[in-house]
Each structure stands twice: as C-alpha cells, then as structure tokens.
Amino acid sequence: MSGRDRILGRVRRALADVADDGTPYERVVDRGYLRQHGERTAGQTVDLLAENLADYRALVHRCAEGELPHLLARLLAERGSRRVLVPPGLPPHWLTAAALPLVHDRAASTPRELDEVDSVVTGCAVAVAETGTLVLDGSPDQGRRRITLVPDHHICVVRVPGQVVSSVPQALERLAPARPLTWISGPSATSDIELDRVEGVHGPRTLEVVLVSGG
Amino acid sequence: MSGGTFVGMPAFPEAAHAAVGDRTLRANLRHATHTIRDKRAKAVAELADWAELREAGKRIKDHTLRHLDRYLVQLEESVVRAGGTVHWAVDADEANRIVADLVKATGEREVVKVKSMATQEIGLNEALEAEGIHAYETDLAELIVQLGEDRPSHILVPAIHRNRGEIRDIFREKMGSWGRPAPEGLTDVPAELAEAARLHLREKFLRAKVGVSGANFMVAETGTLVVVESEGNGRMCLTLPETLISVVGIEKVVPAWRDLEVFLQTLPRSSTAERMNPYTSMWTGTTDQDGPSAFHLVLLDNGRTDTLADEVGRQALRCIRCSACLNVCPVYERAGGHAYGSVYPGPIGAILSPQLRGTRSEIDASLPYASSLCGACYEVCPVAIDIPEVLVHLRERVVQGGEVTRRGVKVTLKPAKGHAAERAAMRAAGLAFARPGVLRLGQRLASRTRRLHPRTLPGPGRAWSATRDLPKVPAEPFRDWWQRTHGTATEGDGE
C-alpha cells in the first residue's frame, strides 16, 4: 500500500466515530472579525502606513509623481550606489534623473551577479497600513523574487492612496494566489538573540519606501 | 518511532532538576520570556477583534481536521496542477528516505535549510549526514544550535538558552570549521553577531542548489505554501536554489486562501509580538524563471493521525507553532526547553510529544505532569487549545491505561508501573467517599493520632514531601465540628 493510501486510511479511521453534521465550509467559520481596525480617510490610511513602516525601521519618503525621478536620484546618490538593479517593467522615467548604469535582471543572472549590485528599485503590488507591510507579486515593475533579496539596499515605490489598503484581509482580497508573493515589513530582522529585535540579517538591510501621490 | 526523541533522555523531573540549578540558563530564560510576554500583550491589545480571530482560527482548524482526508487530496491536486510533486510519508524514516533520495537525484551533496519544526522532529539533518549530505541550518538561532552541537530549547528561538556572550564564543570557535570564520575581534553586540551570521551564510546561499523547508500553512484550494520568517534566510532558501523540498505536517493544511487572513493576523502577534513579521513568502508550485524549477512537497504523518484519533487530544493538531504558550509558562521559564526531551518543548510540547511518540518512554510518560495546570497557556493560545484539559486527559491515560491508536492501529495501554501507589490511594479514596461511615472513622482516627504524624512521608511519598509541607490534620474533623455546633437543627440524622 502506498504512503498516500496508508495516511488517508488512517485519517478516515481516526475520524470514524466523529459525527459529520454536514455544515459546509462557508458556514463553519464566523467571519465576524473586523475587515479593518478603525475608520480612517484614505489620507489617514496612508499616514498610518508611513508610521508603521517607520516603526519597523524602514526609511519613508513622500513625494508627488513629478518629483519621483529626482527623489530616487538623490536617494541613490546619498547611498553612494554605483550599480542599480531594475526589474524589466520599471517605468523608464523613474530613473532618468539618476545618471547611473542600470543593471537589468535577466533570466540568466546568477545570485552572485545580483550580489554585486548596490541597490534595487521596484514598485509594489499592495501595501498594508495596519501592519506596515509591502507586498510584491512578481509583476513586471517588481521582478523576480531574488532581485529584492540579494542586494543590500531596496527602494520600493508605492502609489498612494491607490495601492494602499488598511488591513491584512483587504490585502489578501487584492492578491492573486498563483503568483509568487513576498510580504515585506521593514528590513530583515531577527529576534534570535535574547528575543530582542535586531535589524539586518540576510535580506536588504536598508529598506527605503517612497510614497508617491498623484499616481 | 525514530527521530525526534532525544535518546536516553531522563524523565522530566530529573532533567528539570538539573536545569533549575543552572543560574545562567534561568537568567537567560527569565529575561527573554518576560520581554516577549509584555510585547505580545501589547501587540494583541491593538486588535479589538482578537477574541473573534481566535475563535475563527480554532474553527477553521477544527473543520479542516474533521475533513482532513478531503483537504489533503484537494491540496495534492492543487500542488500538482501548479507544477509541484507530492510525496506522502507515514513516519520519520520514510520522510527522511524520500528527502535523501530527492537530494541525491540532483547530484548535490549539500542543502540549505529554513528553520522547520517538522524536519527537526524527524531528525532530517542526521539522516542526511548518514547519506553523505550536509544540511546547513540558516536561521540564526538554528545556526547557533548547530555550531554549538546543542539542542533546540524553544520553538521560535531555539537558542533562547544562550545569551549574547555565549553566542559570540560559539561563533568564534566554530564558524571556521563550517565555512567562513567569524570576523576578527567579534564582540557580543547583537548587531555584530547578526552581521557575522550574514557573512558566514551568504557564501552558502549563493552556491546552494537544493533548499529544504517546512511551511506554516498550505492552502488546499490553491496549492499555496506559506513560510513566515524574519531574517530573509527563508527567502534565500525558497527562491535561490533550483530544487525546493518542503516537509510539512499534514495538519498544516487550511481549506481556502481567505483563511490566511485570520492566521496572518494572529501568528506574528503571538510569536514575535510584531504586527507583522519582516518576511512572508507564498508560493504555488513553480513559477517560470522565478525561484526553483522543481518543487517537492513531502506530507508527513509521523503520529499525527494517531493524535487525530484521540477525541480530547486531537485539538493539539490546531497548533500553529507560535510559542506564546512557552513564553508565559512558569514551568518552562524555570526548567528550560531541554528538560522536555523533544523538539516541542513547553506546554504544547507536553501534550504534543506524548501523543506523537506515545507514552512508552520515561520522558514521554512524565511530560503530562510537566505543568502546574495554571492555564496561562490556554489564555494566550491563538487557536484556543485547552492545554490543561489535554494534560489531565493524558495523565489519566498514563495512570489508568486505556485504548489509544499507535501507527494507525488501536492498542490497549497498560497502566504505568510507577503510579501503583497513586492508583491504590485513589481506589481507597473512592471506597471511603462512597461509604460515609468508613470516611468518618478514618477522619476521627487521623485527628486522634495527629501528634504521631511524621513531617515527611515515608517510602515512595518521600520525594513528594521533600519539597512540600504535609497538610496538618485538624484536631477535630469538620463533620464532627459541624455536628457539635450546628448539628441537630440542620443536619437531620446526619447520614
């Protein structure tokens, strides 16, 4: 008998004496919990996002659409970045002001090559205000998962208020499960030394978030 | 059952006795558990609907367990449709063999690992080593444990028993023999220690061809797996290698995508006391040119279906491994994780290990007693596992024996030997309470001989009374006092 048959057989025998009241899945769980915590205007939701991002040590910047290229150029210059990695579908005008060689992610790019770039700039799929979370879904302006992982400096651009939701339940509604998803809340951190949070282990140690309005 | 049991482990009382004598260990544990306790309470208080989320989590899990066969089959279909391969492992040996064969088929001799309770439970690293395959732990705490040739002592923070000074010493002494040595002049500043781990492991991540993980959740409807982590080592292992092998307990399945909205709110706040952990990865099968091109899911039973067969004990399978119960437990705080003799320490371990492994060994038979039944664990549990209820149930099982399921077969357990005196005492008490005349006689006799009572118990009771004062027997039994002072008017004829 295969492992599959044995396990399924054991499950069925274990449950043999449990009555099934026939309640369908949809009615089993009371979804009476909140869809979001507190009432806020769109502007207040964006403020909460900024606050919670900063609380987990992300560096938050805000600008209007037209100012984005100059802001990005300044952030990269302040960081001293010489090589900037970009996903295939990053809006080309975002980096026009930064006079830097762009490294385009290719299927053949090895992790080692990615390790040699200084920064990566991406968009995002959705941002969650209550938790200070950015979600990437591998869309063309975000690229493959590895490009926001290996470089030590990640700049993520969020269009506000359009890409911002209040809560985790609202974020899940917007996301497509079949896509590879990465939820990012602040820079890489660990609580492994005396249960104290220390920022900066394997992922990017510096996370900068640009909230762009008018997008 | 192979794997998971720490061979030759003494029963909990002996192991705990040694641990409470270790002052460094007690100080480390006290500091860490108290810090996280307060933070957790604050993180939970931020959500006004915590009670509703907790209830929803419990119901989702109970419903899934009730229909586990159906959801596992659905999960398998979804994962296969998304390009993954599903394997089923009845026990630890089978799971280890499946993983070793998959690694060998790639031609690789090393794997990078994300922290995973399931692979700890089955002793995967040791099994791979026996096949000539090196498994590198990449979670900081797991790395500390692996380099220190130590055992994990906490679900979330396996090296919680180590303070920063000890961690620095381990890194200085051991990193060199596993790969890149610790930087010169490494101090015990946590940020420096984290940096040392980053440098040491980066080389391994960049060259890794095979990653091994567990998962926090598996969604039957979509085939999506979820790993919740902090450091980014999880993302490294899940996305850089060409082959990904995930070993996951069958109880980790949830029916629908939407169910994640409950657990992604309750898990981070319960475990690290954060609104959200730094990184959560979700993947569904394989994605063209993004991440591993081969994905294998190994579904693990290893005692879970036996646990499912126990109508009181099965609630332990709701556990989402947050470790909040460890952090509030007065017994865990003093005894430490090693005394539990299992990769699952603390209150949840005390009910999970004896069910997954059976109560035949001394340590497993003693675990249901590793608790004062104060109930703090139940209060903080985000899926409302009534740990005290299961503990009492398992104590009864140990003392009285009875029918249990082991490896899918119903067997009758004999009462444990060590509890003969307890059973005799309980039988005598039952007899006396059922016959008031006998009870009265006994009480009067006890009162009249009270001057002769020893201060400690003789024989097998000595250990119990070594740390406790025996209750003083009153000069007059309550019933006699009542009879004398209120007697005739209210009590009628007495009995």
Image (cartoon, coloured by chain):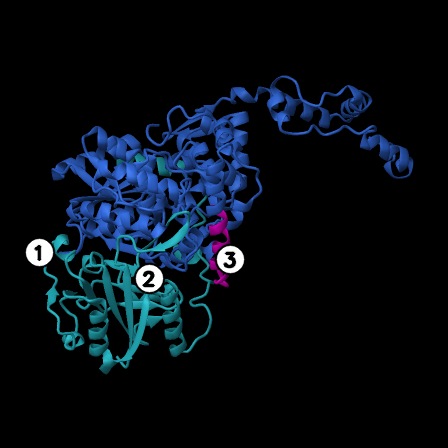
Q: Which residue is mark 3?
A: B51
Q: Which residues are magenta?
A: B33-51
Chain A tint as drawn? cyan
User: Which chain's colour is blue?
Assistant: B
Most extreme residue toward the front, as rendered?
Answer: B185
What's the residue type where badge 3 is placed? Answer: Ala
- How far from the left and from the top, in percent, is residue B192? 31, 50
Work out how far the residue at label 3 is from the one at label 1, CA to CA, in angstroms.
Answer: 49 Å
Q: Is residue B144 left or right of residue B324?
A: left
Q: Quadrant of residue B136?
A: top left
Q: A124 and B479: which one is in front?
A: A124
Residue B35: in magenta span:
yes
The answer to whether mark 1 and mark 2 are in CB contact below 8 A is no
Q: Quadrant of the C terminus of chain B?
A: top right
- Mark 1 or 2: the one toward you: 2
Query: Which residue, given by chain and number where applicable, does mark 2 sit on?
Result: A186
For the point 54% across and 26% down, the residue is B399
Distance from Cα at disc 1 to Cα at disc 2: 29 Å
Front disc: 3 or 1: 1
Residue at which label 1 appears: A108
Q: Amino acid at mark 1?
A: Ala
